[in-house]
Image: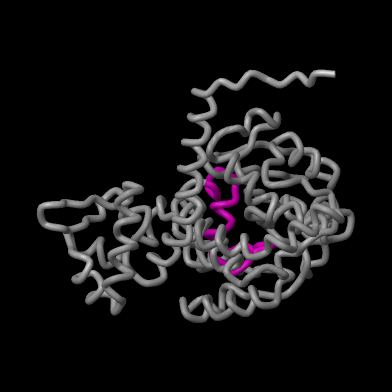
Amino acid sequence: MAVQTSIIDENKLNAFLGQLVGELGATVNAGLIVLGDRLGLYKAMAQSGPITSAELAEKTGTSERYVREWLNAQAAGSFVTYDPATQRYELPAEHALALANEDSPAFVCGAFELATASLKAESQIESAFRTGAGFGWHQHDPGVATGCERFFRPGYNANLVSAWLPALDGIDAKLRVGAKVADVGCGLGASTRLMAQAYPRSKFTGFDYHQESIALARQKAKDAGLQDSAKFEIAPAAKFPGNDYDLVAMFDCLHDMGDPVGAARHVRQALAPDGTWLIVEPSAGDRTEQNFNPVGRAYYAFSTFLCTPSSLSQDVGLALGAQAGEARIRDVATAGGFTRFRRVAETPFNLVYEARP
């Protein structure tokens, strides 16, 4: 019996192979971005203008031969420009905002630190695919925690104090007078410190189950002179201590939790009667196909390595995933006892919700 095979369109095949070659270069270049960040290569280029490989190596205390190869990879990917006449490379000012300026809302090096650290768990995630078991954030390479903070911090810097908190009903006024705030799932505490700096009359406590993250958060608060207004404690989302909070905040973490409904119920109990739950989640549509775009692609990939395994490693294991969408987050809040829920802000990377009793 003859086996029927599909007729191959060679143009489509060649186009896809070209896409894969680009994907291969981008995959390896992720590691080069991390190296450029850690070695200070991007920062030195941002400060120098057109520069030779030897000059960049001297400025950064690195080997010229390695730097030359790195520069050529960056030029081939249009990250930097190259002048054959002078053999000088230059980092465009626009690219420097993304690669060399940690205070810029466009800074992305943390995302690549997070990505490359996540990939170190490839064998464990492969095993999880076969068994259905979970894999917690605490089991990953330490670069996952530090990269995650650096990934989200630029967006928080640009939006949290200026837009997100003022969008909540009455919260900005409470924080200015003096409010009690819990930042649940705080990680290394970037969001907690930002709020503490902006509202010195309020008291903030960051909670996270990950001991190493809390240790780093405490040190960062001390370094910033915020140890009196920004405290950090080890506690899971469904059992953090305290009550009568004016504001409970969760930044990019609710979907990682095994039992987000249980966490929502605990938030409801911990809030003051007129308190507010601020939920910041990755940008996502409610229908799967709405997320077939560059941002959705990145979030689905991170979710496969990080968010979904994290939830599956915990009790209940609801596994919302990083692309849960507004409807599912609303369902979590409603099941947790909240009667009012609305979207108050959005960016290309985040959706921001307010939930109230």
Towards the viewer: 100 or 21? 21
176 lies left or right of 211: left
> x, y (%) of residue 205?
65, 69
> x, y (%) of residue 347?
51, 41
Regarding residue 126, the answer to whether it shows in the image is: yes
The residue lying at 66 percent from left, 49 percent from top is 279
Towards the viewer: 168 or 14? 14
Image quarter (top left, top right, bottom left or bottom right) of the C terminus: top right
Residue most toward the left? 85
The residue lying at 74 percent from left, 63 percent from top is 124
Residue most toward the front? 1
219 lies left or right of 309: left
The residue lying at 68 percent from left, 46 percent from top is 322
> x, y (%) of residue 342?
67, 36
Please, which colouring scheme is shown?
one colour
> x, y (%) of residue 268?
80, 53
Towards the viewer: 275 or 278? 278
Residues rendered magenta in the picture: 164-190
Please count the marks in the image. Answer: 0
Image quarter (top left, top right, bottom left or bottom right) of the N terminus: top right
The residue lying at 61 percent from left, 72 percent from top is 142
